Image (cartoon, rainbow, N blue to C red):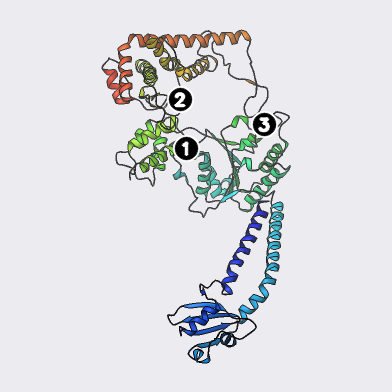
Amino acid sequence: MKLFSRNIAIAILVLLLIATLYPVVTGQLQPKETFALSDVVSEIRTGNVTSIMISGDDLAIRLKDGSERASKKESEAGLTETLKNYGVTDAMLESIAITVEGPSGFLFWAGAVLPFLLPFVLVIFFFWLISRQVKQANVQAFTFGKSRARVISPDSKKNRITFGDVAGADEAKQELSEIVDFLKSPKKFHAIGARIPKGVLLMGAPGTGKTLLARAVAGEAGVPFFHMSASEFVEMFVGVGASRVRDLFKMAKRSAPAIIFIDEIDAIGRHRGAGLGGGHDEREQTLNQILVELDGFEPHESVIVMAATNRPDVLDPALLRPGRFDRRVVIDLPDLKAREAILAIHGRGKPMSEKADLHEIAQRTPGFSGADLQNLMNEGAILAARENRKLIEQNDLLVSIEKVMLGPERKSHILSPEEKKISAYHEAGHALVAATLPEADPVHKVSIVSRGRAAGYTLKLPVEDRHLYSKKHFLAELAVALGGYASEEVVFNELTTGASNDLKTATAIARDLVTRYGMSEKIGPVSLDEPHEMVFLGRELGMERTYSEKMAEAVDSEVARFMKNAYQTALDILKEKREALEAIAKHLIEKETIEREEFAKLMGSFGIQATRGASAA
């Protein structure tokens, strides 16, 4: 319907164009002042006319001042006869050059043929457009089951990526380097009887660089890279997904050695036979075809299938068995060294100030993925450009960290004096408890400037990247999370809704202590967080507890005990160090923000050692 409407619009535009040009071709748009025949006679009598050109019934009259006038004569009589009837004598006409011009062949035939030929031309043009549309529809019908994979050629310098463009993930790159060696020299492996993995599954959190690593493997090996999202296989028509899988593998085999990359494979690779109403037949047919193609490779065919997912737990077991995706590469979030290297890569081509310290930025961004760090560098560049600066300063990157973590600063969100006071004491409670407890992460910044959905925030930074956490650390974090809640109780003897998110976070920590980590003396070393899946839809639609009501009651009791003890710890600290609490809150009310060094100095004046650190909690 859209193409048909477009064709109608084109036909109308052509018609209007011809209607505009036709008068120009026939000379009807020449700018000439028109005279009545009686005015022409008057000009002749006064001797003001130098020449008259006759073209049919049209008269082109040139006056002594060089101007031209247009007029018409009687069609039944000649010009001389007409002028004599108006009283013009032969003597008056002797000084006037009278010429007769016949119409040119082109204009004559154009005026005679175009009125009849133009409708036929338009009709033929219209039917040609319609037939072209039908032809395109037929071609699309025949190619509906063809693969829509995007191909990156090894000769494409613009799109080529190598391991040098991927920072961090050293273990993953080492695993994948074997794939590169096989694609470059497969005979070395075949000679010793080794079989290279046919499928490589890249697993990791969103933004860790799974797609980038797959492209880097193709770039290092110098082979074609066939890239397709798993969701592009499945259509509403039965069999289309399986047909596209067959066509994709056929294309890759013709270009072997090559790499096929299927992004977000969990879209079609989920457990078969599960799901509300018995599953999705078309999706399962597509998965079955992928399984067949993976298992159908001949040993000499140098085609590697790579796939990426952040949900490996939902994949069908048949997809992960040896002979299919038999190599799994886990890509973790980058550590400090990797974050600094990633920042350096994304800083290429960006004019950085000499004072910009990427090491400090890397220290302050634990938990950031590669995509987060790329966004951070981009936000810093945008901030510098917005302020018409030619260099990206360190402060631009520091502000960008908070923007990526918490959202943009909400300058229009102005707190009333009373709300500002409550918010200041709330954040001061968090900061003071964190500074007092040595097991808690050190405070990096305290602010009551609204960002995102938060009216204020306290950023805490661990000294180094952690992989194991102790029970003391969790109990300290619980007390810190309830520090704002306790501060409102101590100062105002009243509670507000500002602590709702703190309570949610603290409850989740306390429940994990009991049900996941076995850190409750009463419950003991038991994991109770594994739900029994009743209906599978990517996530659990419903959960059936695998433990008794008595155990559930004990879990709830332990969670409440952890929460109460943490609240009491925060309460005792705030009451004991009330002067420090007042000093922090007063500073926040006046300046709205306290940076790390200033906070450490302020706590030092009260004998509290505020350790330096580097990441948000």
Please name the residue shown 53% across and 91% down the image.
90
Disc assigned to residue 82: none
Q: Say what amino acid the circle numbered 2 marks.
A: His
Does dot 1 land on a helix, a strand or a loop?
helix
Please name the residue shown 67% across and 75% down the image.
113
Q: Say what amino acid the circle numbered 1 marks.
A: Ala
114 sits left or right of 345 in the view: right
Q: Nearer the viewer, mark 1 or mark 2?
A: 1
Q: Which residue is mark 2?
A: 467
Q: Position of residue 14 (x, y in %)?
A: 62, 63
Q: Nearer the viewer, mark 2 or mark 3?
A: 3
Badge 3 vs badge 1, beta-carbon distance below 8 Å:
no
Q: Nearer the viewer, residue 300 or 361?
A: 361
Q: Which residue is mark 1?
A: 371
Q: Position of residue 459 (x, y in %)?
A: 39, 25
Number of marks in the rendered image: 3
Please name the residue shown 54% across and 43% down the image.
179
Q: Which residue is mark 3?
A: 271
Q: Quadrant of the C terminus?
A: top left
In the rendered image, the vertical position of residue 222 relative to residue 366, given as above or below: below
Q: Say what amino acid the circle numbered 3 marks.
A: His
Report the Cα–Cα distance between label 1 and label 2. Answer: 21 Å
The mark nearer the N terminus, 1 or 2, is: 1
Q: Position of residue 210 (x, y in %)?
A: 52, 39
